[in-house]
Amino acid sequence: MNRDLIAAVMDFIDEVTFWIYGGRGGDGCVSFRREKFVPKGGPDGGDGGDGGSVVLHVDSNISTLTDHRHKKKYAAGNGGRGKGKKMTGKKGMDIVVRVPPGTLVIDEDNNHVLCDLKEKGQVFIGARGGKGGRGNTHFATSTRQAPERADAGKAGEARHLRLELKILADVGLVGLPNAGKSTLLSRISSAKPKIADYPFTTLVPQLGIVRYGEYQTFVVADIPGLIEGAHSGKGLGDRFLRHIERTSLLLYMIDSTSESIEKVYHLLNDELKKYDSALVKKKKMLALTKIDLLTNLERKSLPKNIDRVPCFPVSSITGEGIQICIQGLAGLVREIKNG
């Protein structure tokens, strides 16, 4: 793996693990009223305060899990001890862990999915604080009017979490390295991905918002180019394929100058199927890129569809076919959203 790829992957963190601890509840208090004219007053020990909780909160201003890569644990505050005069101890301070939309929360110990955080402002209590102990006022009876008993506070929950980020987008771009995905994304949206004429220019997933009509938009995700064996980790393929799992539809992008467009299509299809068979069941379109490099005769021989998947010839350099492709994508996005 080259240094640029290592650096980019380190900047784009999409998986982290850490421990979270709810705060311990405060102990209950043993206390008795001792006032000037009440020398033998009854119990007045207050309850301990509840421990704070660790709360995961979706923040749409965050796009990766980078802020958490060096964290080993998040611990909420402990509850305060109860006091005399039936005063309850102070509640422990909650800890808020901010995560991007699309974060999957998994219990690392049993691999159980605890929560799927998709919506802006969504919250999940990962570890609840322990309950505060009861003060001795709770233990007074008709035969035991001066109890010297109080409960200890309860320990908070503890969990070993794994967070996995899966980008949320309407359309996922899929193609071999240098198929023109980044160039198309820069042409149809305001995204500014790195573009160059060599493989693996895109080292981390990119998002772009495509506007069509007067007020309508859809979101496109571009992942690094796939190579044969991507499903098993080659070229970090398995690391990045997760980011198209949530997309509504796929746009396969194939260089129209390829020796065999159908062969490339089936290679891409096979890699997706080996990673997750559900991916190839998604609705899809096919963009044949770089048609500005073809002669008129070569353009006429381009396939209209492959396996009943419609093909859209496009050139991100000249803009030819771009609007027709966008309209096709927009139509499918609407169709999926409308059920």
Image (tube, grey):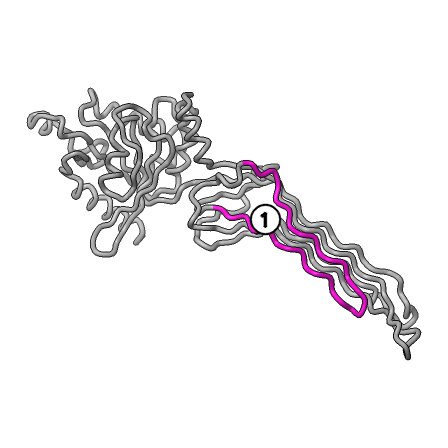
The disc labelled 1 sits on which kind of residue? Gly
Horizontal placement of 318 versus 176: left or right? Answer: left
Q: Residues within 10 Å of mark 1 (few under 14, many from 20)?
A: many
Q: Nearer the viewer, residue 186 or 121?
A: 186
- Say if the magenta span includes residue 177: no
Visible residue check, residue 62:
yes
State whether residue 49 is above or below residue 263: below
Q: Is residue 74 magenta?
A: yes
Image quadrant where residue 142 sits:
bottom right
Relative height, residue 310 to residue 232 (above, below): below
Disc 1 target residue: 126
The answer to which of 154 and 142 lies nearer the viewer is: 154
Q: Residue 76 location, x and y as percent?
A: 64, 50
Asked which secondary structure carries label 1, the reply is strand
- Rendering coords of residue 210 (x, y %): 26, 46
- Please indicate whether residue 320 sits to the left or right of residue 75 in the image: left
Q: Nearer the viewer, residue 311 or 172?
A: 172
In this rendering, position of residue 329 left or right of residue 52: left
Residue plotted at (33% across, 44% down) = 248
Q: Return the residue found at the far front.
A: 36
Residue 314 at x, y percent in the picture: 17, 35
Q: Name which residue lies at 13% across and 26% down.
A: 293
> Please, what is the dominant secondary structure of the magenta stretch?
loop
Magenta span: 70-99
Q: Residue at x 42, y 21 (%)?
A: 1
Task: Give x and y (percent) for residue 288.
Answer: 19, 31
Apparent side of residue 235 relative to residue 126 in the rendered image (left or right): left
